[in-house]
Image: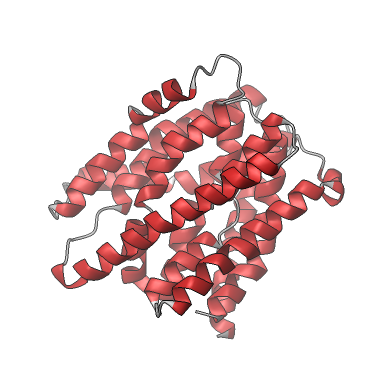
Amino acid sequence: MDQAFLRVASQIMVLFFIMTAGYAARKAAVLEPSTVKGLSRLLMNVSLPALIVTAMQFPFDTEVLASSIQIIIISILAYIGIISFSYLYAKLSKEEPKRRDVIQFSLIFSNVTFMGFPVVNVIYGELGVFFAALYNMPFNLVLLTLGVAIMSRNAEGSGSRKGNIKKALMSPGIVALGIGFCLFVFSVTLPKPLHQAVEMLGNTTTPLAMIIIGALLGDVSLKSIPGDKSLYLLIFNRLFLMPLLAYIPLRLLGFEGMMLGIPVIIIAMPVGAVTGAFASLYDADDYLASKAVFITTLLSMITIPIWAMFL
């Protein structure tokens, strides 16, 4: 158990080293704000779609069909609960609109793609990654529709929410999700050169996201973290309350193993790295987004291994 704790913690530390590189690059003026915004567009329109396609390159196996359907149902119900919780929280919040948007976004979207898959792989292996990819299917759809609507609703010239959702449905990420799902269902493997090219592009997602967050942190005064009460509450909800609200009913319903562990571990992930990229892209409070990603990722070095001990 101690070895598992250290393996999970070391995986998270890797992200911090990359984030530090982005921070140093911004402080040294290697990255300018306009460059960071350009990197955000590259992340959302190129590397993330590539990662989505490669994440679905798993052969369809009838022996795990029942478990696959089960994990998808759990995922859908989990996201319904999380989204409902976030809207209730936002409705009761007295925060300034752009801060409220970032907080709501942070409650819904954990760092599934960038940290969830590696951590699940450490704990459960390749089959766990397969189920995590299935669990993650609603994430991409919700991220590129509701996520865009939430983060851009107070941006200048962002248009109506209906317009934002319609635009998101035509985004490269949604197209990639459709392609990846079809490849998975029909067990189609991309030709090796094409697969390697898409995989290499997808592999840039994690370092690119961490560099963006690090660069945004270069403009953030971390001295403000101790006095930000809203951030404290977000940390508690993201790392403790929400995983607990998933763990209790799943355990009471008799779920165990990966059917229990994967939902809880993914929900227990820190604030998604894409939060900073989205906040930068849609002119939301990227200052708060960067702090939320930074501090929850730091604390998750302790909380994720602890959650893993109960699964």
Residue located farthest toward the top when viewing the structure as drawn: 157
The quarter of the rendered structure image containing the N terminus is bottom right
Q: Quadrant of residue 152?
A: top right
Question: Would you place residue 119 above or below residue 84 in this image?
Answer: below
Q: Quadrant of residue 94?
A: top right
Left or right: 13 as drawn, with respect to 99? left
Q: Residue at x 64, y 69 (%)?
A: 303
Image x and y of residue 74, in percent:
38, 62
Image x and y of residue 140, in percent:
39, 44
Question: Would you place residue 43 above or below residue 160 in this image?
Answer: below
Closest to the observer, 260 or 184:
260
Q: Report whether residue 25 is seen.
A: no
Left or right: 160 as drawn, with respect to 200? right
Left or right: 70 as drawn, with respect to 98? left
Image x and y of residue 147, in percent:
49, 37
Q: Residue at x 62, y 57 (%)?
A: 238
Image x and y of residue 95, in percent:
74, 37
Q: Residue at x 51, y 47 (%)?
A: 83
